[in-house]
Amino acid sequence: MLVLRDVQKSDLAGLKRLAAVLNTVNLPNNEETLSAIVDKSVKSFAGKVKEPLEREYLFVLEDTRNEVIIGTSMIIAQHGTYEAPHIYYEVSEREHYSASLERHLRHKVLSIAYNYAGPTEVGGLVVDPPYRATPDKPGKQLSYVRFLFIAMHRRLFRPRVLAELLPPLLPDGRSLLWEACGRKFTGLNYQEADRLSRQNKEFIKELFPSSDIYASLFPTRVQKVLGEVGPQTRGVQRMLERIGFKYVERIDPFDGGPHFEAEVADVTLVRRYRTVKLADEDFEREGDDVLVCYERESGRNRFRAVRTQARVEDQILYLPAPAKEALGAPKGAKLSLIPFE
């Protein structure tokens, strides 16, 4: 069975294996960076990061039968602070007309912007290639669990939520926009800049041009990827749009990937969140497809969730025995769920 849970320090070896396979910006193949991400998450789930908006939560999806981590996803409580602002390009259109030439032109313009009290961000979604496009839908599980957790703890998060999607990248992982712009102003390659920006965004503000940039100056193939979603991320785009997200005419200043946002209160999964009480009896028939969670108040591995068939009657939840066992929930426990559809 696949189980979603909060990451543990003992998971570092499994994350390193996954990172070595993928080596993406979402899960960098760097032990020091991974260790810092895990440590921050463990403290966040335990409430040991005093300021809730400074917390970052990393979820892992474990194939319990093979005892292997097959994916991750993350929530950053607030993306954009005084110490590390949320930086993006606003995308707009400028029109120019010459009467003498009878020439009317439209230009896409990029304007750098900073947000010091930014939205909650959902990100860090990666899935081990052999598990992709399987009936268990691990990517969808990892996507949905973030909204389940946000619904459970609304007061810990901002009223708006952001998802930054990856654009088409070159086969070697480089970004066309970065090669055309960012690299020229920083002298860094894409991976170096992304790694550095996790701890220090000062170089962006100091080295990037503060004036507007006309995208017409870029090669055509660079212009085409601005605000576009990469082929491996289109499924995520469709899911986000289905639950209430929209493209907000903003892109990542490094790779040009589009930003999608929504009001938390308008996200359909959050609106359909509910709490129930676990029934004593097992459920053995076909029911509704749900993502259900049991959360303990203390101890290690306090968050566990599974996708399962279930039936709800008068706020009582009936679950199959394997799902109960995976959750580790006692009889009569309070559980949280959202539909998995």
Image (spheres, rainbow, N blue to C red):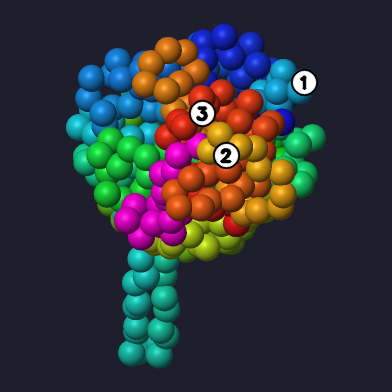
Residue 266 on the magenta segment: yes
Q: Which residue is mark 3?
A: 331
Label whose residue precedes the other's in the sequence (3 or 2): 2
Q: Tell me the SS state at disc 2.
A: helix
Query: Dot 1 corresponds to which residue?
Result: 66
Give the residue at x 46% y 32%.
332
Q: Who comes first in sequence, dot 2 or dot 1?
A: 1
Which image quadrant for residue 40? Answer: top left
Q: Nearer the viewer, residue 252 or 94?
A: 252
Which numbered marker is on residue 142?
A: 2
Under circle 3, the secondary element is loop
Q: Amino acid at mark 3?
A: Lys
Is residue 265 among the parts visible in the rendering?
A: yes
Q: Residues within 10 Å of mark 2 (few under 14, many from 20)?
A: many
Name the quarter where the N terminus is drawn: top right
> Which residue range is magenta in the image?
260-278
Q: Amino acid at mark 2?
A: Leu
Q: Residue 324 appears at what percent x and percent y?
A: 61, 31
Going from the N terminus, do you reach mark 3 or mark 1 first?
Answer: 1
The residue under the point 39% across, 56% down is 271
Q: CA distance from mark 3 to mark 2?
A: 26 Å
Spatial separation of the CA atoms under disc 3 and disc 1: 27 Å
Q: Residue at x 71, y 26 (%)?
A: 63
Dot 1 amino acid type: Asn
